[in-house]
Amino acid sequence: MSDLHRPTPRDPRRLLFEILVAPLLWAIPFALFFGTLYGSSLESYRAAYEVSALFAFVIRGAMGLAEHLIMPRLRKRSDGTSMPWWYGAAVYSAVSVSGSYLAAFIGDRTFMPGLLGSPRAVVVSGLFALLFTLLVGGLIYARVFYRQSVSRAVDLERMKGELTRAELRALRAQVNPHFLFNTLNTIAALIHENPRAAEDVTTRLADVFRHALSASAREHTKLREELEFLQSWLEIERVRFGPRLRVQTSVEPGLGDTLVPGLLFQPLVENAVRYAVATREEGGTVTIHVARDTNGRTFTTTIADDGPGFVPGGRAHGNGVGLESVRERLRLGGEGHAFELDTAPGRGTRVRVTLPLTGSAA
């Protein structure tokens, strides 16, 4: 166990049970054990139960103070880094043993004089400390483990749900009805004017949908396949926009086999075409640049345009679904994944996507 969760608000009735009733129940097996050890009489069982109840209350209280006062301060001092499991176990063990001897001292000075009056009595108190540490500490740690496992399961399900929603939004952004409608219109216009071009666009459309369906069923695809998909998509758009759409692509050699999240870059390229080319009579230039980073562990894909740009923090002339889809998928990707947006009105938009190097490219 790396660390203990922060205490969470509990049901008052359950808290009252843990403080007042549970120690009385915990004392029963110890009373039976020590009552049998010291004579098996009614008086020995009664005395053993009184002592066991005292130990249970004091040690449970000490463990509660450790759980709510000592451990939070230790976590705060750790500056957010997780503590090893044995560190917490050592703290709880020390608190439990200290509580045991405090209970023995209280009993010695009240209803059971001589409880610490001999070396044997001190050893017996130590035995109480050991047994109660195993019982109470074990119960607390079992509860903490249970809470952590439930919390992790909830977090995992939440992340899976977020990832599924992100992938669905990404797929919707990749091959949306507008793109399909515009492409079919292009094909219809070319059938009589240029049948060969119509056939070429149809083939590329099939390639686009084939890759989209394949990539949506897999977590990652090769960078080479993703760039070929983008090339087919851009060639279809080039038929629509003609010379208004200018594309510049540069890829550092040796990166083709590295794995990337499927259908990750297309929303970014689509945004660039939509806002830098489609909305301007003079068109625009879309630049795709892929290169290793200097750290040797990641690479960055930069997708830029020379369009109108937009105010950072605002929306890119629309609903921004493509950008948010990519941002969310990268956030769920964890370490080595990063998203950076650089834009301003009148100077275009540049998006940098950083991913970890995998396979032979690493």
Image (cartoon, grey):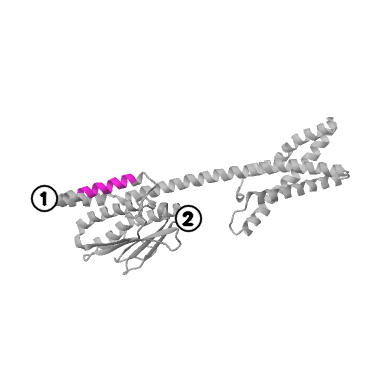
| The C terminus, quarter of image | bottom left
Give the structural element (helix, strand or loop) at label 2: loop
Give the structural element (helix, strand or loop) at label 1: helix
Give the side of residue 80 with respect to residue 262, left or right. right
> In the depicted view, which residue is nearer to us: 42 or 327?
327
Instruction: Say if 263 sits above or below 342 in the image.
Output: above
325 is within the stretch colored magenta: no
Query: What amino acid is labelled 1 in the image?
Result: His
How far across and how far down the image is residue 314, in percent? 37, 62
Q: Residue visible at 87% across and 44% down?
A: 119
**Mark seen at residue 335:** 2
The prevailing secondary structure element of the residues shown in magenta is helix
> In the depicted view, which residue is nearer to us: 327 or 204?
204
Mark 1 to mark 2: distance in Å?
52 Å
Tell me the magenta residue range.
202-214
Query: What amino acid is labelled 2 in the image?
Result: Glu
Give the crowd class for mark 1: few <14, some 14-19, many >=20 residues within 10 Å: few
Q: Which mark is in front, 1 or 2?
A: 2
Q: Residue visible at 66% across and 51% down?
A: 87
Q: Residue visible at 65% across and 56% down?
A: 74
Instruction: Say if 171 sits above or below 296 in the image.
Output: above
- Residue 349 in view in this figure: yes
Q: Residue visible at 17% across and 48% down?
A: 199
**Mark seen at residue 192:** 1
